[in-house]
Image: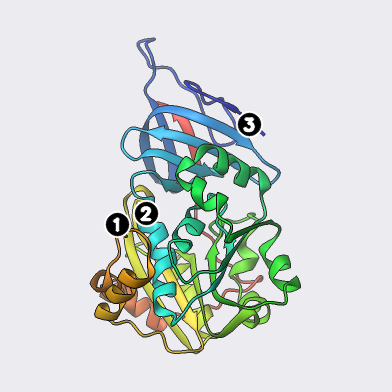
Amino acid sequence: MGEAVENVYGTNAHGDCHRAKDGGDACKWYEEEIDDDLKWCFALNSVLHRGTSKFQDIALIDTKHFGKALVIDGKMQSAEMDEFIYHECLIHPSLLCHPNPKTVFIMGGGEGSAAREVLKHKTIQRAVMCDIDEEVVDFCRRYLTVNCEAFASDKLCLVINDARAELEKREEKYDIIVGDLADPVEGGPCYQLYTKSFYEQVLKPKLHHHGIFVTQQAGPAGVLTHKEVFSSIYNTLKHVFKHVLAYTAHVPSFADTWGWVMASDQPIMLDAQQIDERIGKRINGELLYLNGESLVSSTTMNKSVYTSLLKETHIYTEESARFIYGHGRACFA
């Protein structure tokens, strides 16, 4: 699939190579385009590995500021220094709001971090992780050693398949379904899994009565970026489930506030004291980011975002999809 790389990142669809003007060693950078006139750059120690699977480009980079980082199709997926923020927010709120979660289905999640957080819960009996790209999963198992225990767990069932096809053919239902898919990029393979028809016809029927769906597909939720997909996904889920709750957190390596949405046909109750009690009783180990008060406060939006969520009318369909801008590139500058 790929090759180990220490000091070069060859020119490709997402990358350029440049030499310093004085002829000396170039400073190595990863550069991600956030918008037409906005870029986010990371100084690199090295590019540890790069490759291309059937579905996407993959790179593991060692950044000076955020440590090792996983990059897929030129977009930062997670960074060693702050991935715990993203993955704790993705996984624990829904499991802590559920009265007794035993089964979880993860759509995507190939790097294994979502499964790692799920398996911290003592009540979990079975977690299914379904990712379409076997080469990405193998890549992450090899290079992201922090998730070795999760991949080796007897409670984890790893499936290589399209998440929609896998859900459609399975007869069992789940307490929690997690959307940990690639961002909805134009031309990408995943945007159909953000649509009202998918949520309504495929996903919701696979939830138990008290089941909760949670997705990161809501994407960036900053003052300037929340209208890209966050408000649309929130509104779309409101047309499928009776109870929908959005929450946000700042993820430094994403250069933005990120958004998640929980949805259920049962009320989603958040009580800080109860959350803290459940963390103490249910979770092995210690959470680094979330506690009861921070989870409750994360559901409070600023006025700009709150107003947009309230007034949003767009429903995400195959014909009216919204996309997150941009691809990244690794380069010397």
Which residue is labeled 1 in the image? Answer: 288
Between discs 1 and 2, the one toward the N terminus: 2
Nearer the observer: mark 3 or 1; the answer is 1
Between discs 3 and 1, the one toward the N terminus: 3
Judged from the image, the secondary structure of the residue bearing numbered disc 2 is helix
Query: Is 59 or 149 nearer to us in this picture?
Result: 149
The CA span between labels 2 and 3 is 27 Å
Query: Which three-letter amino acid code belongs to the residue tagged 2?
Result: Phe
The answer to whether marks 3 and 1 mark residues whose Cβ atoms lie closer than 8 Å is: no
Query: Which three-letter amino acid code belongs to the residue tagged 3?
Result: Gly
Q: Is residue 287 above or below residue 80?
A: below
Which residue is labeled 2 in the image? Answer: 84
Q: Is residue 145 left or right of residue 288?
A: right
Circle count: 3
The answer to whether marks 1 and 2 mark residues whose Cβ atoms lie closer than 8 Å is: yes
Residue 113 appears anywhere in the view? yes
Residue 230 image position (x, y, % from top left)? 44, 69
The answer to whether marks 2 and 3 mark residues whose Cβ atoms lie closer than 8 Å is: no
Q: Is residue 202 left or right of residue 156?
A: right
